[in-house]
Image: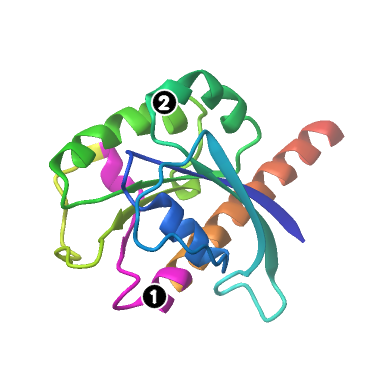
Amino acid sequence: MFKAKILFIGPNESGKTVLANFLSDTVENVEGEYRPTRGVRILEFESQLEGSGDNAKCEVELWDCSGDFKFESCWPAMIKDSSGVAIVFDPDVPSHLQEIETWYSMFISSQGLQDKQCLLMAHHKPGGTVEDGRLPLASHLGRLALIHSNLDEEPEDVRQAFCRYLGNVVNAMSESREREEMSIIT
């Protein structure tokens, strides 16, 4: 069974913790009050991989990272050995759309991750506008998978889309492992 370390990054108040709790089936009573994540929370759970057979599972280590730049000095340690990165943002907040490029350059392009190891999650909060249409993103960000999430309307669609993303991450990890083994042999 593969073990994947996935980072949830993005601006403050974008919904990273809500999504992380949902995907890991973590119950946390916050009574609707926003409490910023301090540094990072690590959630561990097993997930069924979408489209990979009946018994294909993955151990997930989900790192719910604070969006506060005061923790920037800790980010290199968080990035180390990560298998994938999901940038979570609220598409109804214009500043979040502008910040995506910063998060991409700090966590993704600097690590040389493949596009299939990266995910954009447009998280719509209750009462927010849900449009699955195109967002005004830089052209290179258009190559990344994009999930529109709304946990009030279609929560299982979000879980299935995340499982498909995990399948892509595991495939990339498997391909990387095979390349390493071949380089040792030759």
Q: Residue at x 56, y 74 (%)?
A: 51
Judge depth for marks 1 and 2 and give the one in front. 1
Horizontal arrangement in the rendering, residue 183 relative to residue 41 (left or right): right
For marks 1 and 2, give the CA distance.
29 Å
- Give the structural element (helix, strand or loop) at label 2: helix
Residue underneath mark 2: 106
> In the rendered image of this protein, does residue 180 appear above or below residue 136?
above
Instruction: State the image coordinates of residue 25 (x, y, percent, origin top left).
Output: 56, 69
> In the rendered image of this protein, does residue 123 appear above or below residue 161?
above
Q: Which mark is residue 51?
A: none
How many labels sit on residues? 2
Which span of residues is magenta-colored?
A: 140-159
Q: Residue at x 28, y 32 (%)?
A: 101
Report the amino acid beneath label 1.
Answer: Pro
> In the rendered image of this protein, does residue 40 appear above or below residue 119?
above
Instruction: State the image coordinates of residue 23 (x, y, percent, origin top left).
Output: 52, 65
- Give the structural element (helix, strand or loop) at label 1: helix
137 or 42, nearer to the observer = 42
Horizontal arrangement in the rendering, residue 88 relative to residue 64 (left or right): left
Looking at the figure, which quarter contains the N terminus? bottom right
Report the amino acid beneath label 2.
Answer: Met
Looking at the image, the residue that sits furthest to the bottom is 54
137 or 51, nearer to the observer = 137
**Within-10-Å neighbours for mark 2: few <14, some 14–19, many 20+:** some
Q: Residue at x 55, y 59 (%)?
A: 166
> In the rendered image of this protein, does residue 78 appear above or below residue 13?
above
Q: Quadrant of residue 66?
A: top left
Residue underneath mark 1: 155
Horizontal arrangement in the rendering, residue 73 relative to residue 128 (left or right): right
65 or 49, nearer to the observer = 65
